[in-house]
Image (spheres, rainbow, N blue to C red):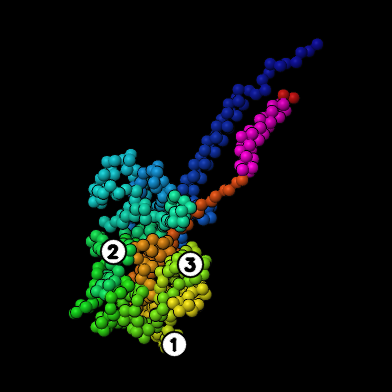
C-alpha cells in the first residue's frame, strides 16, 4: 500500500526568503509614504477650531494684525503654571498665545518662563525690566525692536462682584477673559510704535488722573488713574495735565483733549475759544460733563449735540442697578460700541444728563456726523418724573479722511457724555465701562479700525449640573455598579463563546 509523502515542504527556502523580502520592502515603502506625507503636511496643513465659544479663538481683526507683522515679536509668559491663584488665567493665556504663534510662526515667538523652576533667568528678566517688587510676577511680556509692553494676570480678567455683594457667595467670579483685547493691542503697539500725546484739562475741579509719573494723586472714588492707565498702557499714548487759563494754548502735540467732569465754575470765554480753535483744526475731544460747565453752547452750535439739564435714571428693573446707577438698554452700531454689542455687554451709567442730537444740523451740507451710541429703555425717568427713551452717549465726526489711520487724519472727532462718574476709578471696573473707555480712546486717537472693531473680552462660561438626591443616587450606582457589571457580563459572554 503506497504511503503519502508528508515530508515535502509547502514552500521552498527561496520562496520563504522572497516572501520575507517582499514583506520588508512593503514595510519600508509604508514608512517612506508616512514620512513623505508628514513632510508635505508640515508645510501644507489646515487647522480647525472645534470649540464654538472658545476664549482662544482668534478674531478676524487679530488675524489681520498678525498677518501685517514684519518685525519679530518675542512673547514671554512669566507664570507659575501650577500656581493656585492664576492657574485658570495661565491656561487661557497659554492656549490663546499658542494660537497667535500658529497664526504667524515666522514673526511671533512664544516661550514659557516658570519663575519657580528657572530662578536665574527669571531674576535676569526682572532686572532687565527693572521689576523688583514682590507683586511683579505672573505677567506676559511683549518685546519687539527695543520696545516692550507688560500685561499682568490681574488685568486679564473681568470680575463679577454681584454674588459677593448680595452675600450669596464668599467668592468673586471671573466672568470674562480680556486676553485677545490686550494681546493684539500690545503686539501692534510694540511692532508699530507711535508718539501719541493726550492732555487732561484741569482748573475747574475735574477728576484727577494722578501724576504722569505713575504716582497717584489725591484721587478717592472720583479719581481717573485707571482711565489714565488705559490711555497709557492700552492705547499707547503718553499724557499730561493742562490748564488753559492765562496765556496757555492747546499744545501742538495734543492728539486728544480730555475734559473730565468739571465741577467748579464755568470755563472762561478765552478757554472756550481755545478749545473751539483746537477742534476746528482737526482736534479730538472726550467731553465728560456731569454738570453744566460753559462748553454746552459751543457743542450745540458747532457740533450738533445738546446736553439736557435734568439728570436721569432708568427705572426698568431689567436695567436698574441702584437708585442712581443703571445699565444701558440700547447700544447702536458704531466702531466704539460694536464689540459691546457683539458680546451683549452693557455700560453702567451713574445719574447722567441726556445727550441729544440737534436735528436741524443734519440738513446743513458738511454738518458734523452725530451718532448716538447708547440709550435708556422707555423706562428712563428724569428729575421731573418724565418717562422717555433718553440718549446717553454721542460720537461726532467731521472731515476725517476715510482710510487714513494716522492720528489727526485731517478731521475732528468728539465723544460726549453727560456723565463723568461712569469712568472714574470705581465704576470703570465694570467690564462694559472699561471696554468702552478703551475703544472710545482708540477711536478718538484714530488707531486702525482693526484695533477697534469686534475686539472685546471673551466670556468665561461656567456650567452647573443640578441633581436631586434620587438622581445623585442613580448616577452613583450607575458608575459604581451598573457599568462595571456590564463589562463583567460582556467578558463572561466572550469567554463562553470562545469555550464552545
Q: Estimate how packed mark 2 is, as few (under 14), some (14 to 19) or many (20 or more) residues with alpha carbons within 10 Å.
A: some
* Relative horizontal placement of residue 426, taking residue 19 as reference (left or right): left
Q: Which residue is mark 1?
A: 360
Residue 318 x, y percent position in the rendering: 52, 66
Of the two numbered discs 1 and 2 on the same chain, state the one appearing first in sequence.
Answer: 2
Q: Are marks 3 and 2 in contact (CB under 8 Å)?
A: no
Secondary structure category for the residue under label 2: loop
Magenta stretch: dominant secondary structure: helix
Q: Residue furthest right?
A: 1
- Nearest to the eye among marks 1 and 2: give it: 2
Q: Nearer the viewer, mark 1 or mark 3?
A: 3
Secondary structure beneath label 1: helix
Which of marks 3 and 1 precedes in the sequence?
Answer: 3
Residue 36 sits above or below residue 322 on the image: above
Q: Quadrant of the N terminus?
A: top right
Residue closest to the eye, 327 or 125: 327
| Label placed on residue 219 | 2
Query: What residue is shown with label 3?
Result: 320
SS state under label 3: loop
- Asked if the magenta segment contains residue 465, the reply would be no
Name which residue lies at 71% across and 29% down.
Answer: 493
Residue 286: x and y, percent?
A: 34, 73
Residue 291 lies, in percent from the top left, at 35, 76
Q: x, y percentage for residue 95? A: 44, 50
| Range shown magenta | 469-498
Place residue 349 in its image quadrant. Answer: bottom left
What residue sits 35% from the left and 58% below the top?
Answer: 187
Specify few, some or many for label 3: CA neighbours under 10 Å numbering under 14, 14-19, or 20 or more.
Answer: many
Instruction: Place residue 243 in its image quadrant.
Output: bottom left
Pick whichever of labels 3 and 2 is earlier in the sequence. 2
Displayed quadrant of residue 285: bottom left
34 versus 496 height, above or below: below
Amino acid at each position: 500500500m503506497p504511503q503519502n509523502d508528508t515530508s515535502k515542504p509547502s514552500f521552498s527556502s527561496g520562496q520563504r526568503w522572497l516572501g520575507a523580502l517582499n514583506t520588508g520592502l512593503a514595510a519600508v515603502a509604508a514608512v517612506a509614504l508616512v514620512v513623505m506625507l508628514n513632510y508635505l503636511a508640515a508645510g501644507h496643513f489646515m487647522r480647525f477650531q472645534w470649540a464654538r465659544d472658545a476664549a482662544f479663538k482668534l478674531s478676524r481683526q487679530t488675524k489681520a494684525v498678525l498677518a501685517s507683522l514684519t518685525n519679530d515679536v518675542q512673547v514671554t509668559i512669566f507664570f507659575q503654571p501650577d500656581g493656585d491663584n492664576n492657574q485658570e488665567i495661565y491656561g487661557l493665556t497659554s492656549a490663546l498665545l499658542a494660537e497667535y504663534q500658529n497664526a504667524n510662526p515666522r514673526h511671533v515667538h512664544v516661550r514659557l518662563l516658570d519663575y519657580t523652576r528657572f530662578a536665574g533667568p527669571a531674576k535676569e528678566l526682572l532686572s532687565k525690566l527693572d521689576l523688583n517688587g514682590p507683586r511683579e510676577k505672573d505677567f506676559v511680556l511683549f518685546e519687539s525692536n527695543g520696545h516692550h509692553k507688560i500685561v499682568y494676570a490681574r488685568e486679564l480678567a473681568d470680575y463679577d462682584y454681584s454674588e459677593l455683594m448680595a452675600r450669596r457667595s464668599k467668592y468673586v467670579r471671573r466672568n470674562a477673559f480680556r486676553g485677545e483685547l490686550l494681546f493684539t493691542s500690545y503686539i501692534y503697539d510694540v511692532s508699530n510704535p507711535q508718539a501719541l500725546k493726550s492732555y487732561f484739562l484741569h482748573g475747574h475741579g475735574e477728576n484727577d488722573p494722578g501724576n504722569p509719573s505713575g504716582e497717584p494723586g489725591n484721587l478717592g472714588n472720583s479719581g481717573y488713574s485707571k482711565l489714565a492707565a488705559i490711555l497709557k498702557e492700552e492705547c499707547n499714548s503718553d499724557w499730561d495735565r493742562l490748564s488753559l487759563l492765562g496765556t496757555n494754548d492747546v499744545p501742538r502735540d495734543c492728539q486728544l483733549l480730555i475734559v473730565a467732569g468739571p465741577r467748579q465754575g464755568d470755563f472762561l470765554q478765552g478757554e472756550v475759544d481755545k478749545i473751539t480753535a483746537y477742534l476746528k483744526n482737526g482736534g479730538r475731544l472726550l467731553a465728560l460733563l456731569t454738570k453744566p460747565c460753559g462748553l454746552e453752547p459751543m457743542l450745540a452750535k458747532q457740533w450738533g449735540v445738546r446736553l439736557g439739564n435734568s439728570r436721569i435714571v432708568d427705572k426698568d428693573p431689567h436695567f436698574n442697578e441702584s437708585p442712581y446707577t443703571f445699565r444701558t438698554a440700547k447700544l447702536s452700531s458704531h466702531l466704539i460700541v460694536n464689540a459691546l454689542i457683539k458680546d451683549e455687554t452693557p455700560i453702567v451709567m451713574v445719574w447722567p444728563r441726556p445727550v441729544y442730537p440737534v436735528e436741524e444740523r443734519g440738513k446743513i451740507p458738511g454738518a458734523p456726523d452725530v451718532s448716538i451710541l447708547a440709550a435708556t429703555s422707555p423706562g428712563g425717568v428724569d428729575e421731573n418724573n418724565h418717562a422717555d427713551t433718553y440718549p446717553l452717549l454721542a460720537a461726532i465726526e467731521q472731515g476725517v479722511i476715510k482710510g487714513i489711520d494716522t492720528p489727526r487724519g485731517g478731521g475732528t472727532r468728539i465723544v460726549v457724555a453727560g456723565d463723568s462718574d461712569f469712568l472714574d476709578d470705581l465704576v470703570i471696573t465694570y467690564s462694559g465701562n472699561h471696554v468702552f473707555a478703551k475703544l472710545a480712546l482708540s477711536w478718538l486717537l484714530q488707531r486702525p479700525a482693526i484695533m477697534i472693531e469686534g475686539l472685546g473680552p471673551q466670556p468665561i462660561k461656567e456650567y452647573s449640573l443640578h441633581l436631586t438626591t434620587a438622581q445623585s443616587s442613580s448616577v452613583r450606582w450607575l458608575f459604581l455598579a451598573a457599568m462595571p457589571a456590564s463589562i463583567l457580563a460582556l467578558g463572561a459572554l466572550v469567554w463562553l463563546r470562545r469555550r464552545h
